[in-house]
Image (tube, grey):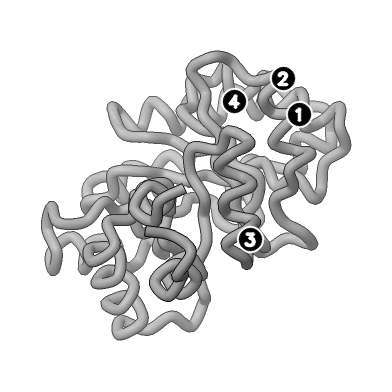
């Protein structure tokens, strides 16, 4: 797989609580240089990035992050604010408490509400696979599909573990035909990035891709 093809699937990510503006500038400059799919950043930086880079960069931000247990109204307002500030893509965390209580319809309703707030912008739904059993993961595939989201995403990167190939295979069996897959969390090697793409992921969320790829002599 060629370098640029890989970069085109990367959400270049900086979500550390202590990320400075200099860190964000480095991220954005790299994203422009290597033509990544987006930068994925904290909501507080969205407007400043948009004001600085305007349409040169595709901004993704996170909602209800990283634990997901904000009330739906708060997630909707966060989403509206992020879109107004210049975000084009939203990665929201489901309410894992609701999943554990078997309230799958409530999760689906929340996804639908956030998607409505997104308007025509992309919504990716983080289900945090490390906390779910197989039945719950399958239920979330259905909730994401029925809620109208554009992507199902494995992980925040802040949980006890991240993306696995096994979960991607499970998603493919149970999501609808219009739902794409984003793998994120713990993806730390070029081999892993390629494996997730080859398994059918459309996006990879990682902070490491540029460092791994820019010096990779085996790719052109």
Query: SS class of the residue under badge 1?
Result: helix
Cα distance in 3D space between marks 2 and 4: 13 Å
Left or right for 143, reference 42: right
Image location (x, y in percent) of residue 157: 64, 61
- 207 in relation to 87, above or below: below
Q: Is residue 105 visible?
A: no
Residue at x-position 35% and y-position 59%: 39
Left or right for 18, reference 175: left
- The residue tagged 4 is 144
- The residue tagged 2 is 173
Look at discs 3 and 4 and give the one toward the viewer.
Answer: 3
| Of callouts 1 and 3, the N-terminal one | 1
Image location (x, y in percent) of residue 163: 70, 50
Cα distance in 3D space between marks 1 and 2: 5 Å
Query: SS class of the residue under badge 4?
Result: helix
Image location (x, y in percent) of residue 29: 24, 72
Cα distance in 3D space between marks 3 and 4: 23 Å
Q: For residue 170, which numbered disc appears in the image?
A: 1
């Amino acid at each position: 797989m060629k370098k640029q093809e890989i970069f085109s699937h990367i959400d270049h990510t900086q979500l550390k609580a202590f990320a400075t503006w200099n860190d964000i500038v480095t991220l954005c400059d790299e994203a422009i240089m290597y033509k990544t799919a987006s930068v994925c950043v904290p909501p507080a930086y969205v407007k400043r990035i948009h004001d600085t880079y305007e349409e040169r960069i595709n901004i993704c931000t996170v909602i209800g992050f990283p634990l997901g247990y904000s009330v739906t109204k708060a997630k909707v307002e966060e989403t509206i604010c992020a879109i107004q500030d210049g975000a084009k893509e939203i990665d929201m965390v489901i309410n894992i408490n609701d999943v554990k209580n078997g309230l799958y319809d409530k999760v689906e309703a929340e996804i639908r509400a956030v998607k409505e707030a997104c308007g025509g912008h992309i919504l990716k739904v983080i289900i945090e696979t490390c906390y779910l059993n197989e039945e719950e993961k399958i239920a979330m595939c259905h909730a994401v599909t029925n809620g109208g989201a554009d992507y199902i995403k494995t992980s925040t990167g802040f949980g006890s573990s991240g993306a696995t190939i096994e979960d991607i295979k499970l998603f493919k069996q149970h999501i609808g035909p219009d739902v794409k897959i984003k793998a994120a969390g713990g993806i730390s090697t070029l081999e892993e990035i390629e494996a997730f793409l080859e398994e059918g992921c459309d996006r990879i969320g990682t902070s490491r891709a540029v460092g791994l790829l820019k010096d990779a002599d085996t790719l052109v």
